[in-house]
Image: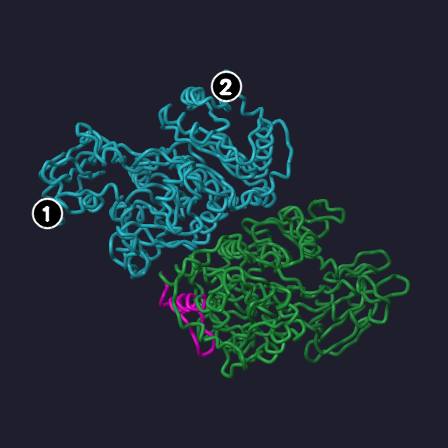
Chain colours: A cyan, B green
Amino acid sequence: MFGTSLRRAARLHGNRCAFKCQERSIDWSTLFERAIRLSTGLGRLGIVRGDRLAMLLPNGLEGIELFASSALSGHVIVPLNFRWSIDEIADSLVDCSAKALVVDDHFRDSGVAAAARAQTTLIDGGSRPAEGSIIYESLFDAFSFSSSMNDCAESDLLAIFYTGGTTGRSKGVMLSHGNAAYVAMASMAEGAYGTDEIYLHTSPSFHIAGAMNVYQAFICASRNVVFPRFEAGAALAAISTEGVTQSLLVPTMIGMLLDHPSFNDTDTSSIRRILYGAAPMTDALLDRAMAAFPRAQFMQLYGMTETASNACILHSRIFTVPGGRRLLSRSVGRAMFGSEVGIFGPTGDLLPPGQVGEIAIRGPGVMLGYWNRPDATAAAVRGGWMHTGDGGSMDAEGYVYLADRIKDMIISGGENIYSLEVEAILMQHPSVRQCAVIGIPHPVWGEAVHAIVTLNAGASFDERALIDFCRGKLSGYKLPRSIEQRDELPLTAAGKVLKRDLRAPFWAHLAPSPRAVTH
Amino acid sequence: MFGTSLRRAARLHGNRCAFKCQERSIDWSTLFERAIRLSTGLGRLGIVRGDRLAMLLPNGLEGIELFASSALSGHVIVPLNFRWSIDEIADSLVDCSAKALVVDDHFRDSGVAAAARAQTTLIDGGSRPAEGSIIYESLFDAFSFSSSMNDCAESDLLAIFYTGGTTGRSKGVMLSHGNAAYVAMASMAEGAYGTDEIYLHTSPSFHIAGAMNVYQAFICASRNVVFPRFEAGAALAAISTEGVTQSLLVPTMIGMLLDHPSFNDTDTSSIRRILYGAAPMTDALLDRAMAAFPRAQFMQLYGMTETASNACILHSRIFTVPGGRRLLSRSVGRAMFGSEVGIFGPTGDLLPPGQVGEIAIRGPGVMLGYWNRPDATAAAVRGGWMHTGDGGSMDAEGYVYLADRIKDMIISGGENIYSLEVEAILMQHPSVRQCAVIGIPHPVWGEAVHAIVTLNAGASFDERALIDFCRGKLSGYKLPRSIEQRDELPLTAAGKVLKRDLRAPFWAHLAPSPRAVTH
């Protein structure tokens, strides 16, 4: 569908600005032509349908062109996390047998070192191309619209996204053209996106949410503003000058926008839809955001790389209309068109409404599998159900509530404690800005509840007061036994707290344990 | 996607009325359960995934159940045109090797005779089941949710629709699960349909437009009111009592609603969207309709059975907003998300904007092919383009304008004359209600332009005055040479004029000609 869509965009909206990134922009007609040229140039290098092409780039026009070219001609794009170490980059190049790696000025040193280690051809789009690399712009010399640029089959591999995020070693999630086309189309059918939007892209495109925003744009030929990285002041300026109507923001980013000194002086009235997800949204922040953007719909998205991003959607209209059910805002929403959610118990049975188990998702968004990992694929996808690793429940109307990452659950004295539940209470304290609750070793209970917090400006840390604040709001066994303060929490690119990194020092001195190995 | 969707509908909207037909109704939970039972019962008869199951039924709950059961378990539904002769019904049963034919009281006699001729098992859902038939309700005895009721692949065959419509012998159009899922989802993404609708179904489900409305309902779990046949008074009553928000209507039906004596006394304020298509909409009728339904969006759909219904959409907002371009209402719209349109010249080259050629459509809605007709499939689908047989042009912005059915084009003295162009002028005359322009034999020019008209109440027929009316509005060679009056025009089930039938008597006395054979 993406080949058809890019040709459609060039035909119907050829002069419309497709993507704008800082001082550069490209219209749909030019993007289509450059995607054909790029495919032609890559074909001459021997990179054709099915071959993997890795990129190590910040959000920008080169990345957009690579996404378009791969969607058009069937080579498989592998956007790598630029925050990775050289070892991690080289490992993934070897894992997927990438035929080439594209870099530019931003992460050239890492790319050069990793490509050398993996013996991968380097393509350089920067101003001082690395020695021995192929000049990115030289790939655009020829224009040849070959039959291979007809549409790929929906079952063809479109992209590989390396994930692992907060747990385990990285796996390559294989998404098909059909996976991405379905999620894009279903999201539009749910009203989350449309052709008339001016969309602000803040998520990196190696993250599925950022990538899906690009694929959605290909289908509906919207106008798009791309930021290499999120910075609240620049985002506010862009909203005002570009008339941005919509963005996907993690809660942390929403907080940064609202807290920015220029927020009150910025005209943000063009914003009509804010999508959020990837991390818990507190009632307090949602209330502030709804008040600050009174014309905007808010929609929470829930999903994962393995479901090509969102599988559930929560529409703010259910709790913002008069008489709306405000408490539903604590749900991550319901299965979107074409998808379904099931909650599985430990023995593999589907649980009735209200019971907590593992959230699983079935539908056309579920990945083809993990690259070269049939074992991991079989463990994750059973009977068509993608087992998310998230604990949660579903009510009788199908609203899904997250309890916790299964692996972030704390087991203390034989009791299951969901870290999100404890975090939700701590977040209600006026001093607390962010918090993460983890299990740390305890000689008697196995694990003890430990909290790590950052504080709001001007607040002072008082461990005892914070524990007392939780008392009465939580059962005794769920109370934090210890709390520490830090200046910041380690975050993934998606804005999730890296609990693995927070836990590691507490467990490092112990003999290898399942937790230390698998988390 | 339909299996997932039906389970989702039962889970999220189980108590919502799914379909209401006269005194009967069924909720989503019950429909899902009955679809499983029906699949189980059909499986016991040996009708399983891939087998063809024909139905000869008016719109009603049995048909909905058969659609749901086939979408869930993978047998292939073949909805037959109940206006066909016994020969035509028997031919199609034989052509697709149907394992059974489902009938009820309405068309039992035709079904019994055709099934006997084709030696097809009969399933009877009526009150006085035919001798030797299987009782429809007996198929619901057992509930067994087998693994075969997991989702079918998107490339699996979903249904066969026999077409031929206005030209040629009937061919079985094979549509996949992916074809129907794509068109349903893209239509929703374009804003043509949603979960909050109360939808009035008037098109028979053997017609692709009627069938797609059912598949869309499966995905978005809307509320639906089904009519066995269109009758303006009953439709108006349903709009008022059920609070209907939306319907798909051919222009003739819109005219019948507006002309009905009870229109002015009926509360139609619930209508917020009217989809129309299948036949030309005149400016005059569109203006009347927009004035009569001031709250409604109007959307024109253009497509065909071979593209799983609509591939182009025209949004009324482009010509109803202040300063809107009213003349665009004469277009059939632009390629919808995921599809593209091309205009091909006689030598197979893509034509530039403004030139008239054959309209072709490419995208995920294009059929798998014609059943057992690889020759006809290869002739129609070339390079992924479905050649529609419609003549037309596209402007620089991608708006598509119909000129004519290629086979309805008149060639007179070597000049191409598009019958639609002549009809559009005749329709501007205040006396003319309907008209059809055809080519009839002429000893010198090959064909001559002939018009057949029906008149508005109270108007009198004056052939000379009508020809004079066209003079100056049309080039001389396009002027009708003769005009006749009739009480009515022969229509297909989709509301299109059967020009083949109008032409036949004029050509019958001639030796076999290409036109007589292929039209």
Q: Which mark is residue A112?
A: none
**Which residue is rendered at x = 72% and y = 51% of the image?**
B357
Find numbered disc 1 in the image and state the secondary structure of the residue it sits on. Answer: helix
Q: Residue furthest top?
A: A131
- A92 with respect to B160 (left or right): left
Residue B101: give x, y in percent of width and height: 56, 72
Give the label on residue A476, or none. Answer: 1
Across and down, in percent, residue A155 comes to 51, 45
Residue A161: x %, y % from top left: 42, 36
Seen at 37% across and 24% down, the residue is A87
**Quarter of the figure with residue B477:** bottom right
Residue A330 in view:
no
Q: Is residue B96 left or right of residue B462?
A: left
> Are discs 1 and 2 located on one and the same chain?
yes
The amino acid pointed to by label 2 is Pro
Which of disc 2 and disc 1 is earlier in sequence?
Answer: 2
State whether residue A433 is above or below residue B134: above
Instruction: Please count the marks in the image.
Output: 2
Depth order, front residue of A440/B283? A440
Per the image, the residue denoted by label 2 is A129
| CA separation in Å, label 1 and label 2 | 61 Å
Query: In the image shown, does A331 or A294 lie closer to the viewer?
Result: A331
Q: Which residues are magenta?
A: B12-39
Q: For residue A264, what is the image quadrant?
A: top left
Q: Chain of mark 2?
A: A
**Residue type of the residue flagged with mark 1:** Gly
In this rendering, position of residue B381 left or right of residue B466:
left
Q: Chain of mark 1?
A: A
Q: Secondary structure at mark 2?
A: loop
Image quadrant where residue A517 sits: top left
